[in-house]
Amino acid sequence: MDNEKNIVVLNQLVEINNDRVEGYETASKETQANDLKKLFTELQSTSRSNLQELSREVVALGGTPTESTKVTGKFFRVWMDVKAALTGNDRHTILSSCEFGEDEALKTYQDVLDNKSDTLTAGQLEMVRRQEQKIRADHDKIKALRDEKVSS
């Protein structure tokens, strides 16, 4: 295994989890709804847990976990700020923006699993699969909440 390649791939996942933490901090500021604030805190917790696990692995390989975020993450946060300003912190709009961010996280994990899995060890792959399942569950919560509010 090439440690440098492993570090690059794992840091892609660190980066998208950094995006999720910052995105949900922004989302939490944009809503007055206590139930959403609580949910956003839980979703940040998922990513913080992922970050700890990924960071330990990057350090064990001799690397440094990235502290940056993806351009799409920056776009997500700016878009959420603009939409919230234009819609008056509308619940459906905030949840739609969150789903956009969740879609980006899932795409990143799926890209690693589909195209870069040969770079990772069996243990790293298991970790990535487990994290992807947690993020998928978070995505489904956001989507269900968003859809529930549209139909009611």
Image: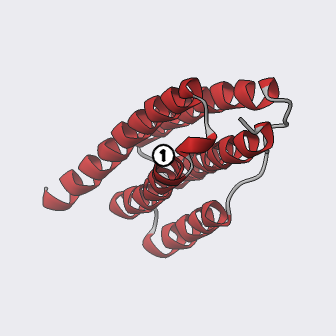
Q: Residue at x 61, y 65 (%)?
A: 72
Q: Residue furthest bottom?
A: 86
In the rendered image, the quadrant that contains the C terminus is bottom left
Instruction: Specify whether 58 is left or right of 122.
Output: right
Residue 29 visible in the shown view: yes
Q: Is residue 125 above or below residue 88?
A: above
The mark tally for this picture is 1
In the rendered image, the quadrant that contains the N terminus is top right
Instruction: Specify whether 2 is left or right of 115.
Output: right
Instruction: Specify whether 130 is left or right of 141.
Output: right
The x, y position of residue 122, in whole percent, is 54, 27
- Identify which residue, 133 or 151, lies in the foreground: 133
Q: What colouring does the structure picture have?
A: secondary structure
The amino acid sitting under disc 1 is Leu
Q: Residue at x 38, y 56 (%)?
A: 95
The x, y position of residue 105, in whole percent, is 50, 51
- Identify which residue, 111 or 30, lies in the foreground: 111
The x, y position of residue 28, in whole percent, is 53, 46
Q: Is residue 62 above or below residue 136?
A: above
Q: Residue furthest front?
A: 1
Residue 35 visible in the shown view: no
Dot 1: few (<14), some (14–19), or many (≥20) neighbours within 10 Å? Answer: some
- Identify which residue, 98 or 89, lies in the foreground: 98
Q: Residue at x 59, y 31 (%)?
A: 50
- Identify which residue, 73 or 147, lies in the foreground: 73
User: Dot 1 corresponds to which residue?
Assistant: 113
Q: Residue furthest left?
A: 152
Q: Residue at x 75, y 40 (%)?
A: 7
Secondary structure under tag 1 reads helix
Q: Is residue 5 above or below residue 41?
A: below
The x, y position of residue 94, in whole percent, is 43, 59
